[in-house]
Image: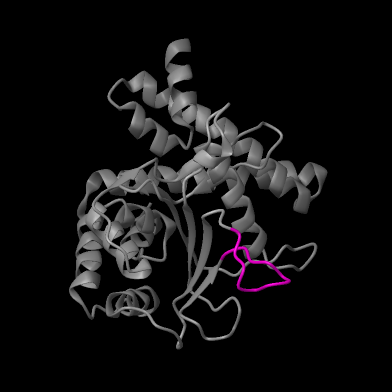
Amino acid sequence: MQDLVKKFENLTIQSDFIFKKVMSRKRICIHLLEELLQIKIADINYLEAEKSLEPDYTSRGIRLDIIVEDDNNTHYNLEMQVKNNKNPHTKAFVLPKRSRYYQALLDIDLLQKGQPYDLLPPTFIIFICVFDFFELGNYVYTFKKCCLENRELELPDEATTMILNTKGTYGDISKDIKSFYDYVNNHIVTTDFTKQIDDEISYLKLDTKVRREFMLMEARLLDERREGIAEGKEIGLAEGKAIGLVKGEAEHKLKVAKLMLAKGCYSLQEITELSGLSLADVEKLKEEA
């Protein structure tokens, strides 16, 4: 328990848990998007923090840190990336195709059955990386689809992927984005914007509800790892970790949600956030209880 307490106290903006909490504050999230894209945003609506998108039981589910839509119906997915992971089998970097997968599932979620494709809103998939994926020194790498035969010809599908490089040294970014990069890298407060972020993190660490949420999340992850390793002994450590973690996670989500429903003192949204289940699954459990 003491180790978890210390881990919680040492969390920074690089932590997915803290990043999600900080970006759940409208004024911070809006300002980051405004400064990054050099636009004005009147308001944003959170479509569900750390939303789980699982369109089909045969598909690979993902968890998205922050998904918001602005007053112009543009949708943004913000992700913090600390490690430049590789596939252990192919040795290929994961990030490029991860961005492709995120875009695909986000689009599926945004278009209701039977709706025409032209109703898909503009989207931005934004990865905040604490490494330079392309090793070119850019502060920002922005991608849209263009014609190979004519590089000036762009496919107007309104889908944009941005890979931010907090270690960058080249490009045109605002003072607040540069200060945000410095804060992510070294926890240095240099502007009012990063002071707001730092104050918010300090406030979060004093919140007993937030602390409890972190403890529950870490306990759940620990159980998943243990179950994965145990099952791995029977079918091979490498495959067992992967299969066991998936199975253990699903079972533990149900267990946590059922316990919280039985308590009767948690809202459906709290149960969704702490168990990791979707809101629809929690509502179904409540009906079955």
Asked if the stretch drawn in magenta spans residue 129, the answer is no
Magenta segment boundaries in residue numbering: 144-155
Magenta stretch secondary structure, dominant = loop
Q: Nearer the viewer, residue 38 or 238?
A: 38
Residue 267 appears in the figure: yes
Residue at image location 59% in from the left, 44% down from the top = 105
Asked where in the image residue 243 lies, by quadrant, the reply is: top right
Image quadrant in which the C terminus is located: top left
Asked where in the image residue 133 lies, by quadrant, the reply is: bottom right
Counting from the top left corner in percent of width and height, residue 86 is at: 69, 66
Q: Nearer the viewer, residue 1 or 100?
A: 100
Residue at image location 39% in from the left, 38% down from the top = 273
27 vs 56, left or right, is left
Q: Nearer the viewer, residue 215 or 92?
A: 92
With respect to residue 223, does 138 lie above or below? below
Counting from the top left corner in percent of width and height, residue 110 is at: 50, 39
Counting from the top left corner in percent of width and height, residue 173 is at: 37, 79
Residue 289 appears in the figure: no
With respect to residue 214, does 199 lie above or below? below
Counting from the top left corner in percent of width and height, residue 112 is at: 53, 30
